[in-house]
Image (cartoon, rainbow, N blue to C red):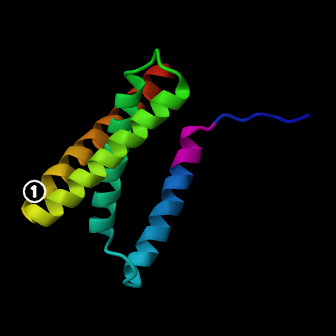
């Protein structure tokens, strides 16, 4: 008989500490620049979240259509990012800032939903 356990805040803190130690170790050995890496990672998480939200707007469509819409939006953002890198590299921080803003708002919404449920 399996016992199902819900993920608690303690589990999330432990996972966050493990990730923190791993990334701090990689930065200490000079493998990655943590601030640049985390900025870009959060930016792309935000842009992927934006793609998911756009795909969910078509909720009456079958799942495969929503998936193709998601892929289309992701490819569009990648092409926009690439074109902007070639034409005007100073515009890339604006795309990163948009993605970072979406990611931060996603985190705030998840924290609010978690705290309001308990």
Q: Image quarter for residue 50?
A: top left
Residue 107 seen anywhere in this rendered image of the structure: no
Residue 15 seen anywhere in this rendered image of the structure: yes
Measuring 16% from the left and 63% from the top, which residue is drawn there? 85
- State the image coordinates of residue 1 (x, y, percent, origin top left): 92, 34
The segment highlighted magenta reads 7-12
- Kindly identify which residue carries mark 1: 91
- State the image coordinates of residue 96 (x, y, percent, origin top left): 21, 53
Measuring 27% from the left and 39% from the top, which residue is drawn there? 102
Measuring 37% from the left and 41% from the top, which residue is drawn there? 72
**Residue 37 inside the magenta-drawn segment:** no
**Residue 8 inside the magenta-drawn segment:** yes
Q: Image quarter for residue 103?
A: top left
- State the image coordinates of residue 81 (x, y, percent, origin top left): 22, 55
Q: How many marks?
A: 1
Q: Main secondary structure of the magenta part?
A: helix
Mark 1: which secondary structure?
Answer: helix
Task: Identify which residue, 91 or 46, lies in the foreground.
Answer: 91
Identity of the residue furthest to the bottom in this view: 29
**Horizontal relation, residue 78 to residue 28: left or right:** left
Task: Identify which residue, 52 or 71, lies in the foreground.
Answer: 71
- State the image coordinates of residue 107 (x, y, percent, origin top left): 36, 39
Q: Image quarter for residue 36?
A: bottom left
């Amino acid at each position: 008989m399996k016992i199902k356990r819900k993920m608690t805040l303690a589990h999330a803190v432990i996972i966050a500490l493990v990730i923190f130690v791993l990334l701090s170790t990689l930065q200490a050995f000079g493998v990655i620049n943590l601030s640049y890496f985390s900025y870009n990672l959060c930016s792309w998480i935000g842009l992927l979240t934006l793609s998911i939200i756009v795909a969910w707007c078509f909720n009456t469509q079958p799942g495969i259509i929503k998936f193709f819409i998601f892929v289309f939006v992701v490819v569009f953002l990648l092409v926009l990012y690439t074109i902007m890198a070639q034409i005007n590299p100073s515009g890339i921080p604006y795309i990163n800032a948009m993605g970072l803003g979406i990611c931060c708002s996603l985190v705030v919404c998840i924290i609010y939903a978690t705290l309001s449920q308990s």
